[in-house]
Image: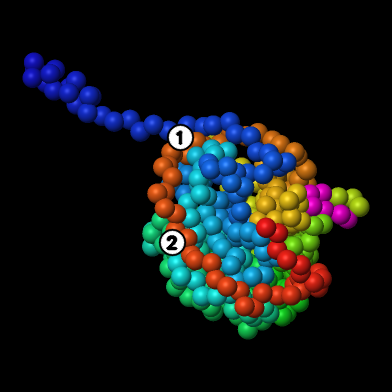
Amino acid sequence: MRKALWIFPLLLSSVVFAAGPSFHHTTVSNIEPRRDTKGQIIDAHDGCLMFFQGRYYLYGTAYGKSAGFGINNRFRVYSSADLEHWVFEGELLKAPPDGVYYRPYVAYNPKTAKYVVWYNWLPKLGDGKVGVAESDTPTGPFTIIAPAAHVAGAAESPGDGSLFVDNDGSGYFIYATVKSHHAIRIDRLTPDFHDSTGEGSPVLGTGSEAPAMFRNGSRYYVLFDTTCCFGPKGSGARVFVASSPLGPYTEKANINRGSDGEPIVPAQQTFVAALPTPSGTAYIWMGDRWGSRPDGIKGHDFQFWSAPLRFLDDGSIVPIRNDAAWSLSIERGRASRPPKQPYMWPLAKDSRSPEKDHCSGQPLGPEPR
């Protein structure tokens, strides 16, 4: 009996209790440019904000001093523990071929334990492709698996697209096809997220781009609106709701258009991010405010992040507000040391640099220094 009394406290001392997540009250500003830990303005547009392994990652296209259609567009990733202090982690794609790159979307595949990025690129203007690359880590660099994925609309010049991963680990790619009047459709992905299965949704709408897809409870949401092409007025966000990822979808009210039909926020949608909070997942709408840079440098255009979306019982979403700033308690991410030397791909001389703006048709002057 005496031995048992000695053993029992020893057993208690060996028990390790796992600590739950801690939370941090963060403030999001939509009037001040986001900067990295070196003071540089974050150049990451038309991408996504993800929470991987206890840290936030912001992915996007770096446009620098270009007009947006040069071969030196880069995919970059920044990381943060609190959405306020950002570390530049480097560029994503390893040795990409020359082309115009935009819209990188990264997802974690729970079946393969790999991170996969799907992105749009054009070997030449007017020839849209969807590329796929993979990495063991969320910061890469990502090795290109397929420079031209076999999506259903591959022959129709795939345009803007983004990724969605369902609760069961299945992946989906929602995208526009330029040569079919910017039709929006969804493809189910193969288990490794390397390609499309060929199974897809009907066309959800035309004349649109910049689609996003997410799930809230038992409902699936798809958001998109009219083409914008770097337009400073931005675009709206039509809401579609379904009980399964491939539909059928029912259209609800537009959350980024006021009673006058103009965008509430002069931004083009890029993503709807899921943030972990003490009361569950908060969804924030993200949009690029094209032409908002005060210094003329495209890479310094602002990105708008909405306050958490508010959902109604019928599945619709309350229109967003043009908030200058807002606060939220989010899960505090783990600390990370800055990389010693972020991966960078050498700049190339762009012999095919366009003479006219692809969106407005206006002549392009010299790039700002």
Q: Looking at the picture, tell me which residue is in the foreground, 272 or 205.
A: 272
From the viewer's side, name the closer residue of 114 and 40: 40
What mark, if any, has residue 145 been given in the picture? Answer: none
Is residue 347 visible in the rendered image? The answer is: yes
Give the number of callouts.
2
Q: CA distance from mark 2 to mark 1?
A: 29 Å
Q: Is residue 58 magenta?
A: no
Region rendered in magenta: 261-266
The residue to which callout 2 is attached is 141
**Front-most of residues 272 and 227:** 227
Q: Secondary structure at mark 2?
A: loop
Q: Amino acid at mark 1?
A: Pro
Residue at image point 60% right, 34% down? 26
Compared to residue 33, the image places residue 225 above or below, namely below
Q: Residue furthest top?
A: 2
Local crowd at mark 2 within 10 Å, few (<14), some, or many (≥20)?
many
Q: Is residue 262 magenta?
A: yes
Q: Amino acid type of disc 2?
A: Pro
Residue at numbered disc 1: 21
Q: Main secondary structure of the magenta part?
A: loop
As drawn, which residue projects farthest toward the right?
A: 260
Q: Quadrant of residue 343?
A: bottom left
Direction from residue 15 to residue 186 in the image, left or right? right
